[in-house]
Amino acid sequence: MGVEAGAQVARSRALAVLRIRSRALAVALLPAAVAVVLWAGVSTGHLVGGGWHLARWITSGAAIVVLLAAAVIALVVARARPAMSPTVPIAEESAPDLYHLVRDLADRLGVPAPSAIALTPDCDSWLEDRTHRAHTPPPAEDRDEISGVRGLRPALQGQHRRAAATAAPVLVIGSPFLWWMRVGELRAVLAPVVAGTGPSAHPDIAAARRFVRGLDAAVAVAAAPQRGPVSRTALAGVGWVARLLLRGCRVHAAEMERGVAVAAAERAQAVDYGLRIVAQEQVGLAYAGWDRLLTRVALPAWRMGRWPARLDAGVVAALTELSRRDRLAEGFTSRLGERPACDLLEEPGAIDEAASLLAARLFHGGPAEPGPDWAPVDWQEYPEEVVDRKWRTDAARLHRVLDTLGVHRTATPTRRDPDAPTLSRVMNHLATPQTPQPSARETADEEEYEYEYGDGDEERVGSERSEALAAGISAEVAREEAAAPAGLAGQGPETSVWDDGGLPLFPLQPPRTGRELLADHVTAMVCCAAMDTAGATPGLDWLDGPSLLLNGERAADLGPRVLTLIEKGDPAPLEAWLRTTGVRPEKPVRLV
């Protein structure tokens, strides 16, 4: 399917959507048309008599009701605000080179240039039509032109609507692409996206899209939970009609968008085709590194009220480390010598900070503005401000739960502070008597069973002490999150939607289980003991997040030993590790 074929399919499907709109209008006007015919019969001397007179009044009443209902539905569809992707608007004054690249690309493709450019904290790029909101006056903070990057953070409270005055859609670019990709790679990746402005300019396709977006927004308005019972009842009919029309448009709208995508992809074949193959490999690499950075580096900071202010710069470090470890990129050094796409921005640091704050809101539900409980953190400060604080906070929580369970502090209390928290207290509580070792025959039978049916690790039941401790930690974490300021809980039911847009959040990970929380807290206690008694230091691993450094080297073998203690009650592997590294478990540690 070529450019013309794809465009033809898109246009034909757009006409099908518009025909559904016309039929809905015809159904709404039908009672009125019948009423006009009946009333016209009076002037001609036809359709007279008692029966026709009653029919005229019944039909007129029905026409008035239907017309009023149609007017309400049309008003809701026209005035409803379709969901719009949260983005960081980029003014042309803050990125003239980027705008020049996009416009030059549009000229080479022979399509209209996008009306504006915005960034999204995700590994994706698309065109977004925001003309449906042209009738809505922008908020006061958005009426001033965003001429400098310093105004980006206030603009996050409302979307920049300068694009609403024109028909061309807004080009949304994934912010990790700008920092990781080279300029040529970014141009090649954006070519199929920018090519989509051609079909978007067709009046039939634009009208069909506006109609579908309006119906979708009307359904959301009718289903809004915050409305009162009267409004909810009045809008129930609107929602029913909108859903009915959406079901009729669904197939045609999907085929229309597929035709638009095919036409755009075919048109972009002539621009940087060879480079696009290499660029698509970098897209996959960027997504992998971005996911690791968010889940393992950013998420621990978000949970404690700190947000890394340079996530996009961090993704470069993470991907560099990923390529170094796994040798994913051939000629990696020479590639990094080329001009990065972030050089197209006047102040990439300020834009990175705005995108990082938006990422925290999207994926965790943090506030829109920094504050005492929601402060930015630089990468240089991350080990001390996040890693060390996180470990000591978790260790303190662990000992508080042990106190509630009535666990004695230590068997060998110190002279200064007999109640000082120690690692020995945790290990002694979790350790259970070990069962005798099985015979060789029993071991062979067990291995044969595990080969046939699996080893049953997922079904292993921990000791009662571990289960009780895990339950206590889970309850303590839940209480702390419930008491956190609004917007900092992140993944609770009260923060499932934005208060300023009704858009859902996208939590990076499901809620942690009690066993996972227990493992994190015991690991944190071991790390605190290593820092206070063996000279270890907190560190940041770009791919795995918080890490413990012993003599400058990362301690990578700690996790399995902690799991053995928790799941089997066997402290021997962890005790051997402590002896090797010189950690003193009986010594008190400093807590937060």
Image: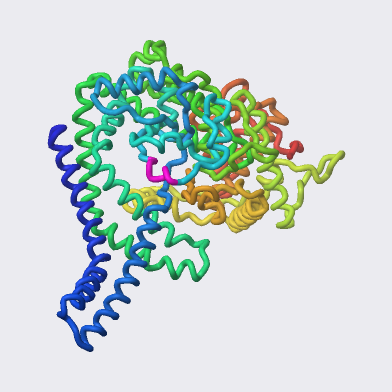
Is residue 246 left or right of 287 when viewed as pictured? left
What residue appears at the point 53 percent right and 37 percent down from the top-left corner? 142
Q: Quadrant of residue 4?
A: top left
For the N terminus, the image quarter is top left
Q: Quadrant of residue 270?
A: top left
What residue appears at the point 34 percent right and 55 percent down from the top-left corner? 215
**Toward the viewer: 564 or 421?**
421
Q: Where is residue 145 shown, x and y percent of the image?
A: 52, 30
**Toward the viewer: 114 or 460?**
114
What residue appears at the point 61 percent right and 46 percent down from the top-left corner? 488
For the C terminus, the image quarter is top right
Residue 573 lies, with reference to residue 101, above or below; the image says below
Q: Quadrant of residue 194?
A: top left
Q: Where is residue 30 shown, x and y percent of the image?
A: 23, 68
Residue found at the far right of this picture: 416
**Toward the viewer: 360 or 148?**
148
Q: Confirm whether residue 347 shows in the render.
A: yes
**Magenta region, residue range:** 130-135
Q: Where is residue 172 shown, x and y percent of the image?
A: 39, 33
Residue found at the far bottom of this picture: 50
What's the colour scheme? rainbow
Residue 449 lies, with reference to residue 413, above or below; the image says below
What residue appears at the point 27 percent right and 33 percent down from the top-left corner? 196
Residue 538 lies, with reference to residue 74, above or below; the image says above
Residue 309 among those drawn in magenta: no
**Toward the viewer: 524 or 416?**
524
How many numbered callouts?
0
Q: Where is residue 13 shown, x and y percent of the image?
A: 19, 47
Q: Confirm whether residue 541 shows in the render.
A: no
